[in-house]
Amino acid sequence: MKFLKLISVVALSAWLVPNAIQRLSGTTTRSEAVATAGHSSAAADLKLAMRKLWTDHTVWTRDYIIAAVDDKPDATAAASRLMKNQEDIGRAIAGYYGAAAGQQLTTLLKDTSQSPLT
């Protein structure tokens, strides 16, 4: 069972990390985001928030994998923080696309990663 959990977490990370890295290959400041993409200020703010949140997501996923594989006591804390990060991502989306979209994304993210964490 532990091996199955590890494989699930590694597979999820293999999908998340490249996607997060791809999202990070954009501009670095709010003004650059607005200028280069021609987007509104709110869109630029969302882009920058997503950059930070998805970077955090990869960090918390990595921390959980390391703790879970080594049976460290901080695995539960890392899993909890990873779940909070998913809520943070949903809240950021809600600010731009509305509460329903934010809740839908949060639910999707949690459903996707909940099974490897339990």
Image (cartoon, grey):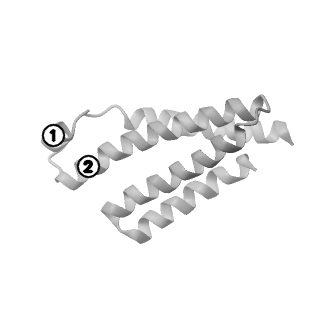
Badge 2: few (under 14), some or many (20 or more) residues near its Cα, within 10 Å?
some
* Amino acid type for the residue under numbered disc 1: Ser
Q: Quadrant of the N terminus?
A: top right
In the rendered image, residue 114, in percent from the top left (x then y), is placed at: 67, 53
The residue to which callout 2 is attached is: 45
At 62% across and 33% down in the image, what residue appears? Answer: 63
Q: Nearer the viewer, residue 21 or 103?
A: 103
In the rendered image, residue 97, in percent from the top left (x then y), is placed at: 34, 64
At 26% across and 49% down in the image, what residue appears? Answer: 45
At 81% across and 40% down in the image, what residue appears? Answer: 4
Badge 1: few (under 14), some or many (20 or more) residues near its Cα, within 10 Å?
few
For the residues labelled 2 and 1, say whether their Cβ atoms are less than 8 Å apart: no
The answer for how far apart the CA atoms under marks 2 and 1 are is 10 Å
* Amino acid type for the residue under numbered disc 2: Asp
Quadrant in the rendering for residue 108: bottom right
Instruction: Report the number of discs.
Output: 2
Disc marking residue 31: 1
Quadrant in the rendering for residue 55: top left
Circle 1 SS class: helix
Counting residues from the start of the chain, the first of labels 2 and 1 encountered is 1
60 left or right of 26? right
Disc marking residue 115: none
Farthest residue, direction bottom: 100
